[in-house]
Image (cartoon, helix red, strand yellow):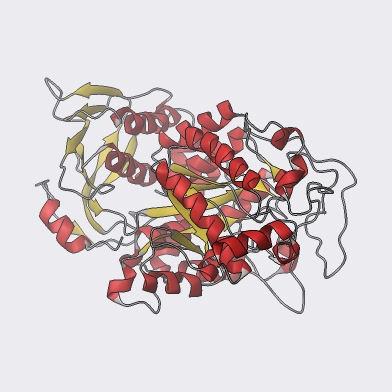
């Protein structure tokens, strides 16, 4: 929701230490996303192996924050810092962790003085984000040295909280599969940017990637395709194929639980997407009775959209959907479940006796309304189990319930319409947030992209990503329905993890700042700070695109 930070922060700040002498901030506090308020002070704190973390309140999740900080300490010093309770603790060379419940849920105050570092937050998540900022205040070069003796951290006072509650990325692991360790690396990267959502796209026409015990054929059959369209080829030029099977690739339920816990330990929620009733060819290939024709399906080898979709006229379709979702809900504790709903051709429904009979029985006039009927039944199932539904903006076409959250990808038009109707909205338009689009204009320097044509350049530079305004064309009252934004990485043309990180970075940092620091954006300052952040990418082995530095946009 829209946050009024000036009032919240003024009322909530309880720390009393102030800068003895203000020093103009000239970029030497280089944190992305930009904090709400930064005061640079005189002097520095000497972080060393002897520094202790002193906890002044109890929270069962505090070890998640201190574990992160100690991960940084171990990289710096080859050892962790002592974590102690306040009683009897030293007063100097310490990192004090205090609680102020009146602070925003994800907000924090971070004060660095020559003698101590003081962190104040409402909860452990705020402490975690304070430590992420402290992490970026360490000289990145120190992370690549072997066990330094100490690290100087610039004295400063930072007051901070995010603007939007939903700040995330989508990672498509269906078109091309990525290992558990690779997904965890993406989660670490998101945590570095104070992002809190991984939208995990785990079912598709080209591959079903989640084990469902009730329906074992989904992974026995649906996780394998006989061949694969070569990345970078497109129907405009003629498809090419690799000439070999792809798979079986999927995550076991134990691996899913492992990833979800790994993310939760970094205060990141994993929202699964089970795309339906379109983009379901892998499921139809596994259980052909789910389709209108009932036979002849095979896991899709081409990219693009298939006219083969689930049959809404059959009750067995809903039995299947609820059976799958029942296991998904056990694996993912997220408040939201994404049901897709995009790019669903309705030709099969027009020709299907069962679908037409369903329309007649339910007094539906159009196939769009038939899809809405499907969506309502799925949403009712989710609500019965205490969850909320997200769908792509196509689901607006037949009408949606007021409780559905809309993810606007075909530009912002759908999101604007949904916000005006009172639905919650996550903005992720192709115009600003599709991270599978190349980053630079120079095609010789960019990885292949399927729809890229010399006569029609199609790329998304850093400047464009940063410029997103999710409130555009909305009144102040309507703006409260925008709950966040995210970047989307689809992987038809992304075959390796190194390539995936190249597409994520540095544009994920622009989305992070746009969603955390919406009222406090400055592209010149951001790019100055980015010069420091990419050194952290290098220290952690994250590949990233150089197009901004090469092309200046």
Residue 322 location, quadrant = top right
Residue 220 location, quadrant = top right
Q: Residue at x 63, y 37 (%)?
A: 210
Q: Position of residue 553 (x, y in %)?
A: 55, 71
- Examine the rendered structure and indicate whether residue 57 appears above or below residue 28: above
Residue 445 location, quadrant = bottom right
Q: Nearer the viewer, residue 393 or 374?
A: 374
For residue 335, say whether it is visible.
no
Q: Residue at x 47, y 45 (%)?
A: 381
Q: Is residue 58 left or right of residue 428?
A: left
Q: Position of residue 326 (x, y in %)?
A: 52, 36
Q: Residue at x 54, y 43 (%)?
A: 186
Q: Which part of the image, by quadrant, shows the N terminus?
A: bottom left
For residue 241, say whether it is visible.
yes
Q: Nearer the viewer, residue 310 or 518?
A: 310
Q: Position of residue 458 (x, y in %)?
A: 67, 72
- Examine the rendered structure and indicate whether residue 88 appears above or below residue 215: above
- Examine the rendered structure and indicate whether residue 347 appears above or below residue 33: below
**Furthest residue in direction top, as rendered:** 88
Q: Is residue 481 left or right of residue 440?
A: left
Q: Nearer the viewer, residue 45 or 1?
A: 1
- Examine the rendered structure and indicate whether residue 114 appears above or below residue 349: above
Q: Nearer the viewer, residue 120 or 141?
A: 120
Q: Is residue 84 left or right of residue 374?
A: left
**Furthest residue in direction right, as rendered:** 243
Q: Is residue 320 left or right of residue 453?
A: left
Q: Position of residue 368 (x, y in %)?
A: 59, 68
Q: Residue at x 42, y 27 (%)?
A: 74
Count of residue discs: 0
């Amino acid at each position: 929701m829209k946050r009024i930070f000036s009032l919240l922060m003024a009322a909530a700040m309880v720390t009393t230490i102030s800068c003895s002498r203000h020093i103009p901030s000239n970029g030497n506090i280089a944190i992305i996303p930009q904090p709400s308020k930064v005061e640079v002070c005189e002097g520095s704190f000497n972080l060393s192996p002897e520094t202790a973390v002193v906890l002044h309140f109890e929270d069962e999740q505090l070890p998640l924050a201190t574990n992160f900080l100690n991960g940084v300490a171990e990289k710096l010093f080859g050892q962790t810092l002592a974590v102690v309770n306040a009683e009897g603790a030293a007063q100097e060379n310490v990192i004090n962790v205090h609680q102020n419940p009146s602070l925003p849920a994800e907000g924090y105050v971070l004060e660095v003085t020559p003698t101590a570092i003081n962190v104040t937050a409402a909860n452990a998540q705020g402490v975690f984000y304070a430590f992420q900022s402290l992490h970026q205040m360490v000289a990145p070069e120190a992370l690549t040295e072997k066990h330094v003796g100490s690290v100087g951290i610039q004295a400063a006072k930072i007051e901070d909280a995010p603007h939007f509650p939903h700040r995330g990325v989508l990672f498509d692991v269906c078109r091309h599969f990525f290992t558990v360790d690779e997904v965890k690396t993406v989660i670490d990267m998101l945590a570095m940017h104070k992002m809190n959502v991984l939208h995990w796209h785990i079912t598709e026409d080209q591959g079903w990637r989640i084990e469902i015990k009730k329906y074992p054929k989904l992974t026995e059959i649906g996780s394998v395709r006989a061949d694969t369209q070569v990345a970078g080829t497109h129907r405009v030029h003629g498809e090419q194929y690799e000439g070999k099977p792809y798979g079986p690739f999927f995550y076991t339920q134990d691996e899913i639980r492992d990833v979800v816990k790994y993310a939760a330990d970094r205060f990141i929620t994993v929202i699964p997407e089970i795309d339906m009733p379109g983009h379901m060819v892998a499921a139809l290939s596994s259980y052909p009775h789910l389709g209108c024709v009932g036979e002849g399906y095979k896991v899709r080898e081409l990219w693009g959209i298939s006219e083969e979709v689930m049959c809404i006229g059959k009750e067995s379709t809903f039995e299947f959907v609820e059976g799958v979702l029942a296991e998904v809900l056990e694996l993912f504790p997220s408040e939201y479940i994404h049901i897709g709903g995009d790019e669903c051709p309705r030709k099969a429904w027009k020709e299907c006796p069962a679908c037409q009979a369903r329309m007649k029985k339910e007094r539906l006039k159009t196939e769009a309304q038939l899809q809405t009927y499907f969506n309502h039944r799925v949403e009712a199932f989710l609500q019965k189990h205490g969850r909320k539904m997200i769908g792509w903006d196509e689901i607006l076409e037949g009408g949606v319930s007021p409780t559905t959250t809309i993810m606007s990808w075909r530009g912002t038009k759908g999101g604007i319409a949904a916000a005006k109707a009172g639905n919650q909205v996550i903005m992720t338009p192709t115009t600003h947030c599709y991270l599978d689009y190349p980053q630079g204009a120079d095609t010789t320097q960019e990885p292949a992209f399927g729809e890229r044509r010399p006569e029609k350049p199609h790329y998304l530079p850093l400047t464009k990503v940063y410029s997103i305004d999710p409130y555009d064309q909305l009144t102040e009252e309507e703006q409260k329905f925008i709950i966040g934004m995210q970047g989307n990485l689809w992987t038809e043309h992304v075959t390796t993890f190194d390539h995936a990180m190249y597409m994520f970075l540095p544009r994920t940092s622009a989305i992070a700042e746009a969603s955390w620091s919406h009222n406090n954006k400055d592209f010149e300052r951001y790019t100055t700070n980015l010069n420091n952040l990419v050194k952290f990418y290098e220290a952690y082995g994250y590949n990233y695109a150089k197009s901004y530095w090469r092309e200046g946009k």
